[in-house]
Image: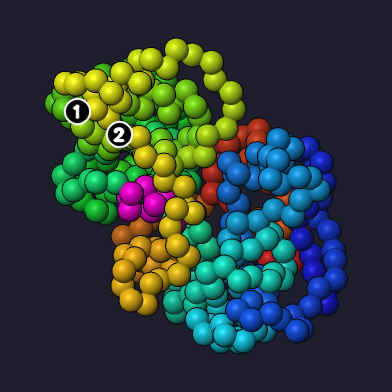
Amino acid sequence: METKSVVFESPWKVEFKEKNGNGKGLPAGVAFVQTETSVVSAGTELAILSGNESWAPLPYAPGYGIVGTVRAKGDGLDSVDVGDRAFTFGQHASFSLSNTLIAKVPEGLSSEHAVLARIAQIAMVAERTSETHVGDYVAVLGLGLVGNFAAQLFSIAGCEVIGVDLSSKRRDIATECGVAHVVDGSGDVKEAISDITNGKMCRTVVEATGVPAVACQASEYSAFLGEVILLGSPRGERTEDVTPMLNRIHLWPKGCVTYKGAHEWRMPIDNDPNGHIHYSFQNNVETIFRLMQNGKLAVEPIITHIASPDQAPEVYKGLRENPDEYMGVVFDWRKL
């Protein structure tokens, strides 16, 4: 069977290729999925495309999350049946083999929207990791796909959310998605947050950019005994005096700020049948599907491009050179 896929051949060189593949003789727990949509994770994929990610040497076939039809499955896979429309982790390819979180997509939820659950469940880890309660102030630094979803999820949980970004377009999209407050990241962010919170600052600050300098600054926006959640994966070098940040973490009475890592893989993939583990990839995706279906989690304003996969070179060029315009990108494999 002919399979078409996106391939990162060398730094900043993207190609659309064909290869052979089939769904015969599948190992236990594996599904063979015909892709309808796949979602681009700009931060991770551009980092790979730069050639600077040692864990993903080029040439590399990228991918994050897909929605498609299960065409075959191995023994022991009970979450879906052949013919079901399913969500899973997979490459940007017309067909994928997957054994990681294969979940049936609810009826009435479009494939274009459902595939965004891959990004939203990453954002949900910040809310799951936090100690926030209804009415707490939460600042989210960075309003790209992950940051926007994080801001929405904290809002849904009853928090008063402040989104911060340099981009006016991303701030506008966040407002359209229901984020209560937005702040221009190029201004005096600390003063703006102080004004919004009446000087209380934030119970939780979510760093969703992956920029080390922003991670160091984040504790400035936290209240006493607050927390900073590192949601974005840090990339790039930064040289500065970290003592002020360490003092905000360590000292009483204006510090004692806790830093927490919120990488998605801190959670197990599957639900615990005995109920000992409250949250998992599976639980998060099921929750996100429900929030999408009932209209609480906004998806439409986030999607800026639904592109044919053979436009991949143009798409990644846009993601790199014009990130304001190329925010939420979905490949629609039905366009081929």
Find residue 258 and name its label. 2
Looking at the rendered structure, the kind of residue marked 1 is Phe
Q: Is residue 124 left or right of residue 319?
A: left
- The local secondary structure at tag 1 comes to strand
Identified at 54% across, 44% down, the residue is 327
- Which residue appears at 74% of the width and 55% of the height? 61
Pointer 1 residue: 224
Question: Residue at 81% of width from left, 48% of height from top?
Answer: 59
Residue 13 within the segment the image draws in magenta: no
Element at badge 2? strand
Left/right placement of residue 102 relative to residue 258 reads: right
- Quarter containing the N terminus: bottom right
Whole-percent x and y of residue 260? 37, 39
Q: What residue is at 38 percent from the left and 23 percent from the top?
A: 217
Q: Position of residue 289 (x, y in %)?
A: 40, 67
Spatial CA distance of label 2 from label 1 is 10 Å
